[in-house]
Amino acid sequence: MGVDGRNRGEGEGRLLDHRQEEITAAADALRAGGLVLLPTETVYGLGADASNPAAVAAIFEAKGRPRFNPLIAHVADLETAARIADLDERAYALAREFWPGPLTIVAPIKNTSAVCDLARAGLDTVAIRVPGHPVSHAVLEAFGGAVVAPSANRSGRPSPTTYADAVSETGDKAAAALDGGPCAVGLESTVVSVLDGQPRLLRPGAVTRVQLQQIVGPLAEADDDAKRSPGRLALHYAPDAPVRINAKAPEAGEAYLAFGDWPESAQVFNLSPSGDLAEAAANLFAYLRAADRIRPSAIAVAPIPEDGLGEAINDRLRRAAGFVG
Ligand code: TXA
Ligand code: MG
């Protein structure tokens, strides 16, 4: 696995032939109203046909997700996105720069769009993204329409970044499940709204603040958390053990998520021995899960620098620890 968005077994071009059957089957399952576990470059998603309210309701049920929390519509390309949402000049600029890839754009819904009310939690906006992973891209092309897909964890738990974790979270609810290898990015997409011409960062993620500013200039200040992105509850991404952040060292009984040079031991999970933020992001959720499995009194996490991807990593860690970001 690398941080360039590519995954095992697939190159830039066509998928391996044996996968085409799986992909067709997944698209058929979506058409039949089933849920599908899908790999993306960020995290695994649990997908459903965005135009089918019963299928969308099944997602909320499977995750135990509050219905006021809207879902992201995933599409194969910008043209399909533009049929669903009113993308202004700045939204287009962002889409052209970062799609396919780990950016979600929130824009006004078009009244001709098939994304159902439930998927949007009744809002007159829609969150939309074109994922970069070859397997999800192939499924979206075969399906043709929009697929809503939240992260495939049960609500409030860390997002799954490996096939095994996705299957253990919600696999029993899925009619089809596709293995796309470990997620190269490992953190959810950045969510930016572009409403009334004003880009606003709703959720820090894989595309950094600086990268966004290079395309659209300054971002609007965030409102209060709940209004920014309805699903951003305080406690989120949480493993079973309590999480203690900014810990310079572990205490007895704690597991430790180190960052940078740190002595190895059975209690230590080093997010990146070389202090690389992209590597730490890719390992974060899998290591929170691995640390949880040794049943520690708590999971202590080393301080992570706030620059670049660090903003998104620290956002998830504050939520895992029970603080509002
Ligand atoms: O990387 C990702 O974004 C993954 C993969 C599977 O694509 N998906 C994901 O979905 O993280 P989910 O449902 O876990 O998070 C979607 C976020 C939530 O915080 C939700 O509140 C916000 O997007 N959102 C969705 N629609 C919105 C809207 N119309 N306005 C504001 N925020 C919205
Ligand atoms: Mg989620």
Image: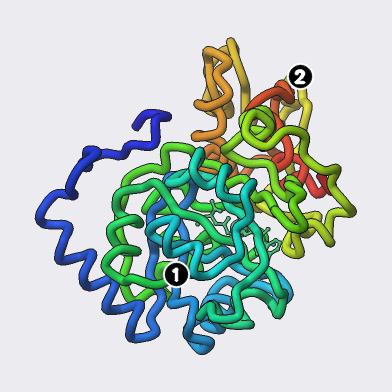
Mark 2 closeness class: few <14, some 14–19, many ≥20 residues within 10 Å: few
Q: Residue at x 31, y 50 (%)?
A: 180
Instruction: Report if the beta carbon of the residue with label 1 is closer than 8 angstroms to ligand 1.
Output: no
Name the amino acid, label 1. Answer: Val
Query: Tag 2: residue type?
Result: Lys
For this rendering, which residue is in front, 252 or 4?
Answer: 4
Ligand 1, seen in the image, is in the quarter at bottom right
Q: Report the residue that reaches farthest toward the right.
A: 224
Q: Is residue 293 left or right of residue 38?
A: right
Q: Position of residue 209 (x, y in %)?
A: 69, 33
Residue behind mark 2:
248
> Residue, x 50% and y 35% (percent of image)?
282
Q: Position of residue 286 (x, y in %)?
A: 50, 42
Residue found at x 60% / y 80%: 111
Residue 242 visible in rendering: no
- Ranked by sequence position, the earlier of labels 2 and 1 is 1
For the residues marked 2 and 1, what is the alpha-carbon distance in whole angstroms?
42 Å
Whether the residue carrying mark 2 lies under 8 Å from ligand 2 is answered with no
Residue at 63% in and 82% down: 117
Residue 191 visible within the image: yes
- Please determine whether, in this image, residue 129 is positioned above or below residue 31: above
- Secondary structure beneath disc 2? loop
**Residue 222 badge:** none
User: Colour mode?
Assistant: rainbow
Q: Above or below — where is 290 with respect to 266?
A: below
Q: Nearer the viewer, residue 83 or 53?
A: 83
Quarter where residue 69 is shown: bottom right
Residue 42 place in picture, x, y as percent: 49, 46
- Which residue bears the numbered disc 1? 147
Q: Look at the picture and state if 172 lies above or below 279.
A: below
